Amino acid sequence: MANYDEKILQQYADDLYRQAKGIIVWTAVRYGAAVFLVSFLVSMAVASTQKNVSTDAANSGLILVLFLTLIGIAVGVDAGRRKAFMLKLQAQQILCHRQTEINTRK
C-alpha cells in the first residue's frame, strides 16, 4: 500500500511550472514554422503555375509569406500563454491541496 507523500505533489507542481516557463516560446516557434512552411509551399505552387514570375511578384510573395509567419507566431504566443496559464493554475490547485493537507494534519 502506498502512503501519502507531500513531496510528490510539490515535485509535480514544480514540474508544471517548468513546463509553463518554456511553453510560450515553444508554441510560438511551432505555429510560426507551420505557417511558414504551408505559406511557402503554397506560394511555390502558385509561382510554378505561372510561366514568368517578375521580381516584384516574387518579392510580394515573400513579404506575404513573412507576414503570415508573423501572424502565426503571434497566434502561437497567445496559445502558449493560455496553455502556460492553465499549467500554472493546475500547479496552484495542487499546491493548495498540499497546503490544506499539511494544515489539517496538525
Image: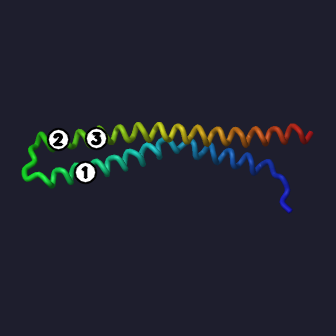
Residue for point 22% across, 49% down: 43
Residue 5, x across and y down, in percent: 81, 52
Furthest residue toward left: 52
- In three-dimensional space, the C-alpha distance between marks 3 and 1, rounded to whole angstroms, equals 13 Å
| Residue 3's disc number | none
Secondary element under disc 3, as helix, strand or loop, is helix
Furthest residue toward bottom: 1
Type of amino acid at the residue the image marks with label 2: Asn
| Residue 66's disc number | 3
- 10 Å neighbourhood of mark 1: few (<14), some, or many (≥20)? some
Secondary element under disc 2, as helix, strand or loop, is helix
Residue 40, x across and y down, in percent: 26, 49
First in sequence: mark 2 vs mark 3: 2
Q: Quadrant of the C terminus?
A: top right
Residue 103 picture quarter:
top right
- 10 Å neighbourhood of mark 3: few (<14), some, or many (≥20)? some
First in sequence: mark 1 vs mark 2: 1
Residue for point 47% across, 45% down: 27
Residue 76 falls left or right of residue 20: left
Residue 74 picture quarter:
top left
Q: List the residue tagged with mark 1.
A: 42
First in sequence: mark 3 vs mark 1: 1
- 10 Å neighbourhood of mark 2: few (<14), some, or many (≥20)? few
Q: Nearer the observer, disc 3 or disc 1?
A: 1
Considering depth in this image, is 58 or 7 the residue closer to the camera?
58
Secondary element under disc 1, as helix, strand or loop, is helix
- In three-dimensional space, the C-alpha distance between marks 1 and 2, rounded to whole angstroms, equals 15 Å
Residue for point 25% across, 51% down: 42
Type of amino acid at the residue the image marks with label 1: Val
Type of amino acid at the residue the image marks with label 3: Leu
Q: Nearer the observer, disc 1 or disc 2?
A: 1
Q: List the residue tagged with mark 2.
A: 59
